[in-house]
Image (tube, rainbow, N blue to C red):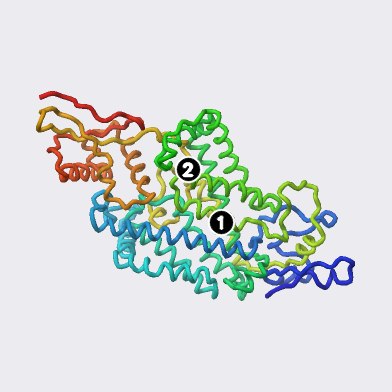
Amino acid sequence: MKYLLGRGEAAGRAEQLEPVVVIVPPARGWLAKKGKINNAVLQEKDGGRSPWCERFFMTCYLMSYRFFVLCKVGLSMAYLWACWDFVRINLALGDHLQDLLPPLASETLVNDTALNSALVNTLLLLSSLAMVWIYFVLAPVAVGLFIWGRHRWVQVGVGAWVWLSMIGLTARASILMSTADFWLNWCFICYVVAGFVTPRRRWDKSQPPTSRELWRANPIVASEYALLVVILQFTVYFYAGINKLLDGWVPWIYGTAIQNLSYDLSMRDYARGLPVPFWISAIFCYVTLFQRLVVPFGFFIMRYRGWAVLILGAMHAGYEMLMQVAIFPLVGLSGLLLIIPPRELALPLCSRPTLKQDKRLRHVLKSLPGPAPSFTQRAAFLVVAAILLVEPIANAALTPDLPYWNIKLGTLLHWTMFSDGGAHSRVRLRVGVMVRDPKTGMQRYDEVTDLPLRYLPDTWRTRFYQQTLLFKALAAQNATGEEIRRSDYLAGYVRSAVKLYEGQGGPHVEAVNLELAPYDTCPFPIVQAK
């Protein structure tokens, strides 16, 4: 229902308050009898002044209707982008890309043989070419229904379908998934959860549908889904900072991480390899840690929500300009839209902590009733919130032995964006083939490092495959040739490189050399005369 605030109590006063439209579920039970504000809203205390933070045990988050809709539009665009990427990748698997990736049927997801077989067979069905085309055709329908937003169980089905489609699209090429894909998956999983934790007959109020009238009114919305997404957003940033301290203490604390990352494969061509002075690198290292470890707490403090959005939004914009991170800024900025405080509740960014809110704002806060979810719904909400908050800690402790089934299901909560501080960004894997020049009789190494990459579609995800190869080579740098040949990724890459080299008219390959070399290493030399 709609509540028109600003009439009644204020009538008869010298100062008339302008009506404010708010969409919130009505209060029920003893809270309504006592005249108290429920857990979805701010509560006034201390002589009429409103507190500066929303209570952590509430099940709703307050934001503007327009930003709620725009958030859903942004997530929809990210999903369509991911679909397009993985449809192209799955089509390439039918050509030669399968030579570079281990077959899904041979992968081990869990230790139990029977359960592993069931999971693999299910993934094989979901990732079949026919299913890939179904996901692609139905993707616009799914996002249209998601933005439309009406009917609770239709929306639950839409969220579940999007998650299922991402599982099927990525099952055969999980190596090409990014942190943003897991983040996006969880945004839709939270949408499914919201369908179960929203009180009865309140879906259209807590998760309002797209409507021209509501867009014009731009009411305040108290949403369960928004709170879940904000909690998820908090964990992404905060645990990314924690993992930076765990995995990259030296480069991040000593200020060299930015210098290292300037050589990372994620950098755009015009920015890769640019020399970064140490003092600039050190400043940005500590700014990054501040953004990760401190700023996210502002999501839950009304006064600082605007600052949090401004700081992290600028970070995402900078990433997009310097790095090829594609849907990562899109998902991040979409979630930040929910955190922008409603106009009626916003305070000036540079206001003093002791500044009292004006009469109109206090009137809005006092008039906001809250939802009354059942005990089961509240318990389910708390369980999901606990998973979002606790599982990243467990995954940080398990690194690098993360559960593989968690990756295949797209539910991994492990936020490690550049957590190692670019420790290996200055190193690259080089593959050289030893051949004999038919004209001079000289033996030489020809570099064939990038030849197999032509099997991959031209997307920003190619670098994830390159990074995996690098890590495999780092793990096997002291291994024998036989151990390297048993590596699915390294062996497949070498075979494809040799096949392509000889197929384009090159001399017969006598030997293959894999080496880890600095970023700007000169070409392989001529090694021996006849």
Crowd class of label 1 (few under 14; some 14 to 19; many from 20; radius 10 Å): many
Q: What residue type is labelled 2?
A: Leu
Mark 2 touching mark 1, by CB under 8 A?
no
Residue 302, position in %: x, y?
A: 70, 54
Q: Please say if 73 is above or below 150.
A: above
- Name the side, left or right, on which 58 lies relative to 121: right
Q: In which quarter of the image is residue 205?
A: bottom right
User: Which residue is the site of mark 1?
Assistant: 335
Number of other residues with Cα within 10 Å of mark 2, as a class: few under 14, some 14 to 19, many 20 or more = some
Which residue is pictured at 54% across the width and 59% down the height?
384
Mark toward the viewer: 2 or 1: 2
Q: Which amino acid does label 1 sit on?
A: Gly
The residue to which callout 2 is attached is 322
Q: Residue 304 carries which label?
A: none
User: Which residue appears farthest toward the top when viewing the image?
Assistant: 529
In which quadrant is the N terminus drawn?
bottom right
Q: Distance between the residues labelled 2 and 1?
A: 21 Å
Helix, strand or loop under label 1? helix
Whether residue 472 is situated above or below residue 388 in the rendered picture: above
| The C terminus: image quadrant | top left
Chain-order first, disc 2 or disc 1? 2
